[in-house]
Image (cartoon, rainbow, N blue to C red):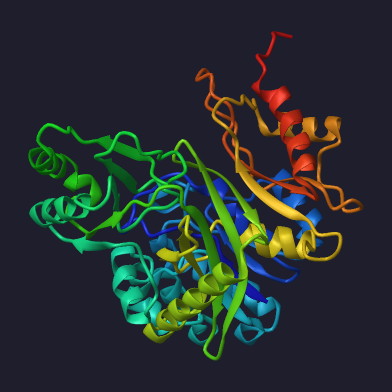
Amino acid sequence: MRIIVANHIDPAIRHRTDLWAWTQRALWGARNGDLVLLCAPPDPGFLRYATGLTGTDPKQLHLVTVPPGQFGGRLLDPQMLTHPDLVAQVRSVLADVGGAQAVTQVWALWPSASVARFATALGLDEKLPGAGFLTQGGGELVNNKAAFRMLAAAAGAPVPAGTVVRDPGEAATATCSQLASTGAVVVKQAHNGAGVGNELLVADPSLATGHAGARHLHQLQRTDPTTAITAYWSERWPWASAQGRFPVVIEEFIPDARTVYCEQHLTDTSIIPTEMGELRYTGRRLSHESVPLRDLTPAVHKQLLDGSTRLAATYRDVGYRGRLSTDAIVTPDGQVLFTEVNAQVTGSWHIYEVFAHHIVHANTGPERTVTETHVPAHWTVPDGATFHRTLTELGLGYDPATRTGVIVSMPIVDPPPGTGRGAQFTFSTVYDTPASRDAIWNALQTRFAAPRTAA
């Protein structure tokens, strides 16, 4: 039995309020006999759907809802993991299956100190890899983009030109220096994901920036750059530094770079590469992600794997154990530069480990590719039932016989009434050729992007 904790980044690091649907992706990893801690009861339809694809019997899962705490069931409150009622409930489950010795591992989406405290309360410290490191708040260190640049230097892994700054004056000086040799810089918050915590500070308006992962963009005035940079940092330092709580990264922007990653699994005795993938951005927002990554040249593949392995070894030496994603860009001339490390169960994990390798067997001939997509803003999906019904009507649901079709990655939350917005969620398309992928996409685009008429 594994104990799976469906948590998210600690609120003390980055404030989030409603991620219950996203964290239920932990159910993709659940197998017969596992115990899963959730912030809210699982969506019944999603539980049936996910376990149907993984071959897990939902009746053989122990599903435990953590006390609501400060988020009212919308997000797992870390403080609730040691609530006496929860500890007693988990102990009761363990007593029915042979006690604590039945637990093979404690496994969490986010490496929180609260998970270490939970394991300690149950006498399961030895079942949580890297427990001592997590107890001291190590999860923040190994997911901090500023700390990444320091650790990358120690590992000898190549990174884009840049620096870490700790006050607005230092930031302005570093920005002026960086912009002297490039047309733009990337400003990075220490903690955020999918480009949401990145801002492009652009001096050259001719630069193409749509391919970059940066939710925000600021165009500098060209008349007096130094004054404009100082004014920028006076305004944006509170956002970039999370009100002065964390240092900020200023990094060279490289046009036309390709965004890739290599994930690893770190144990006490080994570093195991698990998958390589690619991230694509449209209008600077993450639009889709594909695995496996098969089209790298041998030289680029070697750079990505070698640098990723060096980073993984350094993070393991620091004390981290578990899943780790090394993100990188490939420059137009074929150089791999690492941009961050995410030492957690990332949003890529279910795509490659569960979808590509457990369900689809993507590397078995004939090979398949899995591409995860965020529902486009111009689609209007009224609710989850409609989307699943549409997949059935169009024959687009995942078919084990052909190993193609659509896998819905998470519970689909209905949009708030009266907003005119569609439901927001992610889904994966499994295909053999780009033409097959386009056919699936176009069929869904036609159905959900077209204006809906009244019944």
Q: Residue at x 39, y 75 (%)?
A: 157
Q: Is 387 rendered above or below residue 42?
A: above
Q: Residue furthest front?
A: 333
Residue 86, given in percent of the width and then of the height, sits at: 51, 65
Establish if 80 lies above or below 218: below
Tell me which corner region of the image, top left, top right, bottom left or bottom right, holds residue 435.
top right
Closer-to-camera residue (327/301)? 301
> Residue most toward the top?
454
Rendered location of residue 102, percent (x, y):
66, 83
Residue 264 position, x and y percent, is: 55, 74
Residue ranking furthest to the bottom:
269
Q: Which residue is drawn at 64% across and 75% down?
A: 2
Residue 357 image-quadrant placement: bottom right
In-front residue for pair 307/47: 307
**Left or right of 138 on screen, residue 454:** right
Q: Determine if residue 56 is in view.
A: no
* Image position of 305 (left or right of 224): right
Q: Would you say 137 lies left or right of 167 here?
A: right
Q: Position of residue 447 (x, y in %)?
A: 73, 23
Q: Residue at x 66, y 58 (%)?
A: 291
**Quadrant assignment for the C terminus:** top right
In this view of the protein, can residue 186 be seen by the observer?
A: yes
Q: Which residue is drawn at 68% across and 77% down?
A: 1
**Residue 84 vs residue 53, the one in the foreground:** 53
